[in-house]
Image (cartoon, rainbow, N blue to C red):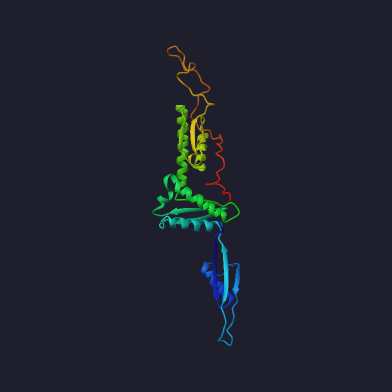
């Protein structure tokens, strides 16, 4: 994919006036310094009556990754018949954040954010083909991604405690690498539970289960109770406490390239 290019040819009685005309066409301030090409120099009329020609100046602007991404995203929304959705752009260091607003913004989010993720992925591809260095692109609407992340954190922790209590594993729905990592991070902070990923490509999902290294306390365990009536439960050093361990490191889900990481060209 080629870098998006904007250009304009200005016409005027002199090269200076032609340059100003080209700047106006591109929406550039007249005081801004730009590179330009003189296509045709002004020629005066002979005897003030015959011949002569105006000056022509050409300005060519190569759009940066932020501008390229914004133009692409706007065209996609237009093709989706979502003209009511408008884009708020915020440039950050080595990246840009787009916040979408409007009446039909729900269509942009899609089922569990799938449409929003697809828009971000494609926009990131376009932006990173417009520049040689990595450029991070985030497409959000309101605080949807923040709410989604919080929901996944709570879900991961809840299912981790469930795995400890029941001794059974639970399979979640397929998720993208970023969301799977959120689940892994949440589960790994709970003592007695582990998580891993299964499946390939679009079917890859997280499974949460009890950690086999931790022994669960059971009434059926012969060492659990004294057989005599009124016996006291012995101290079990291997019993699991449902507590969060902030020191456990999250599972490495692998490269996040593709949706939220670097896009290889």
Count of numbered circles on the image: 0
- Image x and y of residue 55, in percent: 57, 76
Q: Residue at x 42, y 45 (%)?
A: 111
Viewer-proximal residue, 58 or 98?
58
Look at the picture and state if 251 lies above or below 136: above
Residue that lies at the very extreme toward the left in this rendered image: 103
Above or below, comparing residue 259 to residue 162 in the picture: below
Seen as rendered, the residue at the extreme top is 228
Which residue is at the far bottom? 47
Relative to 24, say whether 242 is above or below. above
Residue 249, located in which quarter of the rendered image?
top right
- Please provide percent x and percent y for residue 42: 59, 78
Residue 215 in sight here: yes
Where does the image place residue 24, in percent across and percent down from the top left?
52, 70
Question: Where does the N terminus fall, quadrant-wise?
Answer: bottom right
- Residue 143 at least partly seen: no
């Amino acid at each position: 994919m080629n870098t998006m290019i904007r250009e304009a040819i200005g016409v005027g009685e002199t090269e200076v006036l032609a340059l100003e005309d080209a700047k106006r066409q591109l929406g550039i301030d007249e005081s801004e310094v730009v590179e330009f090409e003189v296509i045709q120099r002004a020629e005066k009329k002979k005897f003030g009556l015959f011949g002569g020609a105006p000056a022509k100046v050409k300005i060519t602007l190569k759009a940066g990754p932020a501008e390229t991404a914004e133009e692409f995203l706007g065209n996609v929304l237009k093709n989706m018949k979502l003209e009511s959705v408008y884009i708020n752009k915020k440039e950050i260091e080595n990246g840009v954040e787009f916040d979408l607003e409007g009446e039909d913004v729900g269509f942009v989010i899609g089922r569990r954010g799938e449409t929003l993720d697809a828009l971000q992925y494609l926009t990131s591809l376009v932006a990173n083909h417009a520049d040689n260095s990595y450029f991070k692109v985030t497409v959000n609407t309101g605080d949807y991604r923040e709410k989604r992340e919080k929901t996944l954190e709570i879900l991961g922790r809840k299912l981790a405690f469930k795995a400890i209590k029941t001794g059974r594993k639970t399979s979640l729905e397929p998720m993208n690498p970023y969301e799977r990592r959120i689940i892994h991070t949440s589960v790994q902070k709970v003592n007695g539970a582990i998580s891993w990923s299964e499946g390939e490509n679009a079917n890859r999902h997280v499974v949460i289960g009890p950690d086999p290294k931790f022994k669960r306390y059971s009434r059926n365990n012969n060492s659990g109770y004294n057989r005599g009536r009124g016996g006291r439960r012995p101290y079990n050093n291997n019993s699991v406490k449902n507590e969060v361990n902030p020191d456990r490191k999250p599972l490495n889900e692998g490269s996040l390239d593709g949706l939220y990481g670097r896009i290889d060209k």
